[in-house]
């Protein structure tokens, strides 16, 4: 199992919309997340800075393949098309990232 944390900004005028979207995530998206070996997925919002912190645990054996499967899903592409305009990627993210991945520096289990 691999724990993963990530961060992204949220457009101030989109906070209510983003909360509403995630209060009723489409069932197909929830199924896809599970099928791609992601568990314990949470997103936290820090206001007034409007930073989103995402956490999940990856329990599969081929992360790249699972992420490719997720990206290839037409329903997920539709979901991203409504979520991504709400988000504001960090300028300091690595090339190719939308959400900036974070290094785990402590865990107590």
Image (tube, grey):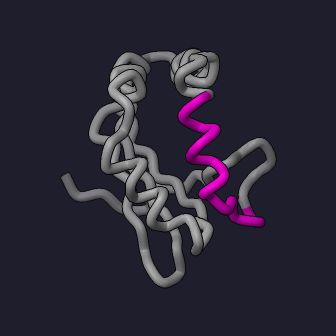
Q: Position of residue 81 (x, y in %)?
A: 64, 38
Residue 106 placement: quadrant: bottom left
* Residue at the far right in the pictured view: 95
Say left or right for 20 vs 8: left
The foreground one among 33 and 19 is 19
* Residue at the far left in the pictured view: 109
The N terminus is located in which quarter?
top left
> Is 11 part of what is drawn in magenta?
no
Residue 47 placement: quadrant: bottom left
* Residue plotted at (69% across, 64% down): 90
Residue 56 to residue 26: above or below: below
Give, as a single range, the part of the protein colored magenta.
78-92
Report if residue 59 is visible in the image.
Answer: no
* Residue plotted at (27% across, 40% down): 40
Report if residue 25 is visible in the image.
Answer: yes
Main SS of the magenta segment? helix
Total count of labels: 0
The foreground one among 72 and 58 is 72
Residue 71 to residue 108: above or below: above
């Amino acid at each position: 199992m691999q724990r993963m944390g990530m961060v992204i900004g949220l457009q101030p005028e989109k906070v209510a919309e983003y909360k509403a979207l995630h209060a009723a995530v489409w069932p197909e998206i929830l199924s896809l997340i599970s099928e791609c070996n992601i568990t314990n997925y949470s997103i936290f919002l820090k206001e007034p800075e409007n930073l989103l912190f995402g956490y999940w645990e990856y329990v599969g054996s081929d992360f790249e393949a699972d992420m490719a499967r997720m990206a290839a899903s037409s329903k997920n592409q539709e979901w991203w098309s409504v979520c991504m305009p709400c988000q504001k990627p960090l300028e300091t993210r690595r090339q190719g990232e939308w959400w900036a991945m974070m290094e785990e520096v402590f865990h107590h289990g």
